[in-house]
Amino acid sequence: MTVDPRAALDRLTAALEAHYHAVVARQGEDDPAVDDAYDVLADAFEVYDDALGTVHGEATPFYLAEEDDDEDDEDFDDADEDEADEADDDEWTDEVEDDEAGEDDEAGEDDDAGDDDVDVLEAEATR
């Protein structure tokens, strides 16, 4: 059974309003009314997005993040995150140093090391 996209949009709009009102009237950090409104909003969005795709072949530019059933994973370990950032920084620094070393090459040599990165960025930008 296909849901009417207009009806799904009306439900989504109502869910957005309800979520906003729940957030404004929040009764503490873990207010169940906010959690319930969040769930209703997420469901209304999925129904609308599916209906829009089914009937009109279109999609919204939004997506819902996957929920983790393990609440322990919600607390990020800052040390691990910092180490990952440092590793990325070190890799970037090595690439820059390699590129700078390539500038001292003989005039006839072509350093294509950075071209692959540009191609990847251009490909990602077109998605």
Image: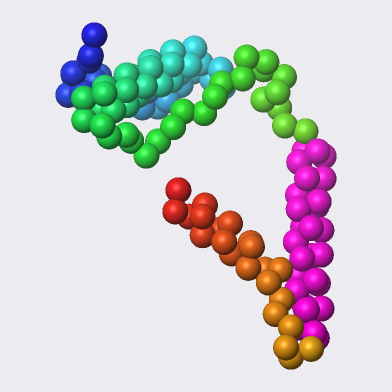
Q: Residue at x 41, y 21 (%)?
A: 42
Q: How is the image coloured?
A: rainbow
User: What is the chief secondary structure element of the magenta stretch?
Assistant: helix
**Could you tell whether 65 is left or right of 100 in the image?**
left
Task: Examine the rendering and report whether any part of residue 124 can be seen.
Answer: yes
Asked if the stretch drawn in magenta spans residue 91, the answer is yes
Asked if the stretch drawn in magenta spans residue 100, the answer is yes
Q: Is residue 117 above or below residue 103?
A: above
Percent x, y of residue 19: 37, 23
Among the 4 quarters of the image, the one containing residue 57 = top left
Among the 4 quarters of the image, the one containing residue 10 = top left
Q: Residue at x 67, y 17 (%)?
A: 71
Outermost residue, bottom side = 107
- Range shown magenta: 78-105
Task: Examine the rendering and report whether any part of residue 13 can be seen.
Answer: no
Q: Residue at x 18, y 18 (%)?
A: 4
Instruction: Pick whichever, 32 or 39, lies toward us.
Output: 39
Q: Is residue 105 above or below residue 60?
A: below
Q: Is residue 69 above or below residue 126?
A: above
